[in-house]
Image (cartoon, grey):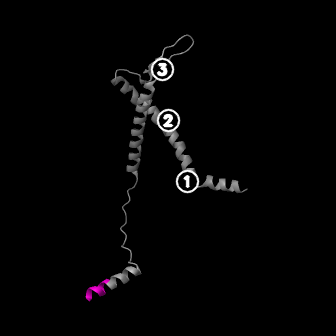
Amino acid sequence: MGILQEFKEFAVKGNAVDMAVGIIVGAAFGKIISSLVADVVMPPIGVLIGGVDFTKLAFTLKEAAGNESAVTLNYGNFIQALVDFTIIAFVIFMAVKFINSLKKKETPVPTAAPEPSREELLLAEIRDLLKEK
């Protein structure tokens, strides 16, 4: 029964539940950002660079022969992944920046200086007595 109890404590803790919610929301947000990149941002970029589809860019290492297909180095997919990553990272940065601007800014309350310790008081008294002599 000990393992079940430990698992229950782990699963019900606030951190585990918060993490699960964050992962689920993050996955949904990832789909939104991927759609934004693929459907909104990339078409104008494609028009600006002359309609080049990065995913079609490849370097042939070995030509197709008979039943064997060609061996290609698909560097266009890599370029597309880099562009997607850069745009996604920027959009997430802007979203986090916006969310942080909505948060209430707290001003730190100044705290009084802590009382000197007994040792410090004794040392100060000794110092003052030595100055008098």
Q: Nearer the viewer, residue 55 or 127?
A: 127
Give the residue type at disc 1: Asn
Whether 29 is drawn above or below 4: the answer is above
Estimate the x, y position of residue 95 in percent, counting from the top left: 41, 43
Q: Which of the two discs, 1 and 2, labels the residue nearer the N terminus?
A: 1
Whole-number angstrom distance, CA of label 3 to CA of label 1: 46 Å
Q: Secondary structure at mark 2?
A: helix
* Direction from residue 37 to residue 66 in the image, left or right: right
Circle 2/circle 3 CB separation < 8 Å: no
Label 1: how many Cα within 10 Å (few below 14, some 14–19, many 20+): few
Estimate the x, y position of residue 67 in percent, counting from the top left: 57, 12
Q: Which residue is mark 2?
A: 31
Quadrant in the picture for the N terminus: bottom right
Q: Which of the two discs, 3 and 1, labels the residue nearer the N terminus?
A: 1
Q: Which residue is mark 1?
A: 15
Q: Which residue is mark 3?
A: 72
Whether 89 is drawn above or below 61: the answer is below
Give the residue type at disc 3: Thr
Estimate the x, y position of residue 99 in percent, counting from the top left: 41, 47
Whether 19 is drawn above or below 64: the answer is below
Kindly identify the residue that appears in the image at 37 percent across and 70 percent down.
Answer: 111
Q: Nearer the viewer, residue 28 or 122?
A: 122
* Residue extent of the magenta highlight: 127-133
Kindly identify the residue that appears in the image at 53 percent across and 15 percent down.
Answer: 69
Label 2: how many Cα within 10 Å (few below 14, some 14–19, many 20+): few
Judge depth for marks 1 and 2 and give the one in front.
1
Q: Is residue 132 in the magenta section?
A: yes
Q: Secondary structure at mark 1?
A: helix
